[in-house]
């Protein structure tokens, strides 16, 4: 029995099919040789494939999955450890190549399936584009008070100075006002 056959049989179950199609995370089932057996609709959508995900293609050639090696510019493929060493992995940030050769950052988990007659693996991935955009916007907005040419201060309920941006500090120094609000004269 091949991995494709086992998955095809499982897909006949309405419950399995509903779960497979309803997951919000991408799931890619690969056989023991590293070829794509199936991908759920969410995974196809994340990678821009729609319904035409190529089945039978080598997973690494299709996805070009890469994870950054810490403290270097180099990248490595996590699939080799999954296929050769049969080790489960989780990577908080990996890079997949989508249909139109664009890169997509994902959170990635690889699980080895040895319980079925023909072994295989599951790649489970979640699109990080919204998280990365949020993080970028948060960092950009956090830097606005520092970069703003207009004086900005923050006071607590008692009227004490909690924060002053660089423009306000310069203005306070020019006016001879200390951080406690009293003049230096």
Image (spheres, rainbow, N blue to C red):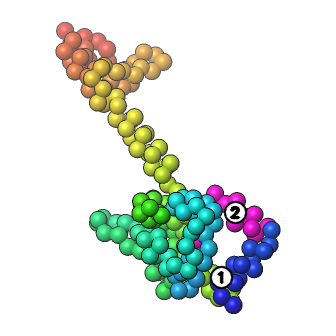
Query: According to the image, label 2 marks what residue?
Result: 21
Picture layout, residue 155 above or below residue 85? above
Mark 2, residues whose alpha carbon is within 10 Å: few (<14), some, or many (≥20)? some
Rendered location of residue 22, percent (x, y): 70, 59
Image quadrant assignment for residue 54: bottom right
Q: Please state the extent of the stretch shown in magenta in the rendering.
A: 15-29
Picture layout, residue 50 above or below residue 30? above
Mark 1 or mark 2, earlier in chain: 1
Rendered location of residue 158, percent (x, y): 46, 16
Q: Is 110 part of what is drawn in magenta?
A: no
In depth, the one of 90 and 41 nearer the eye is 41
Q: Answer yes or no: is residue 21 visible.
A: yes
**Residue at point 66%, 88% (across, down):** 2
**Residue at point 49%, 49% (across, down):** 131
Q: Quadrant of the N terminus?
A: bottom right
Rendered location of residue 185, percent (x, y): 19, 9
Q: CA distance from mark 1 to mark 2?
A: 17 Å
């Amino acid at each position: 029995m091949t991995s494709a056959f086992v998955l095809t049989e499982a897909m006949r179950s309405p419950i399995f099919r509903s779960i497979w199609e309803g997951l919000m995370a991408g799931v890619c089932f690969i056989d023991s040789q590293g070829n794509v057996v199936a991908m759920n609709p969410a995974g196809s959508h994340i990678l821009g494939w729609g319904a035409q995900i190529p089945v039978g293609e080598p997973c690494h050639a299709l996805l070009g999955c890469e994870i950054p090696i810490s403290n270097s510019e180099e990248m490595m493929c996590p699939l080799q450890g999954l296929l050769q060493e049969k080790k489960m992995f989780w990577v908080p940030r990996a890079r997949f190549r989508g249909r139109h050769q664009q890169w997509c950052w994902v959170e990635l988990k690889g699980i080895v399936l040895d319980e079925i007659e023909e072994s295989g693996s599951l790649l489970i991935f979640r699109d990080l584009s919204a998280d990365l955009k949020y993080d970028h916007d948060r960092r950009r907005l956090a830097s606005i008070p520092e970069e703003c040419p207009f004086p900005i201060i923050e006071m607590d309920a008692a009227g004490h100075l909690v924060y002053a941006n660089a423009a306000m500090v310069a203005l306070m120094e020019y006016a001879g006002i200390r951080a406690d609000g009293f003049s230096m004269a």
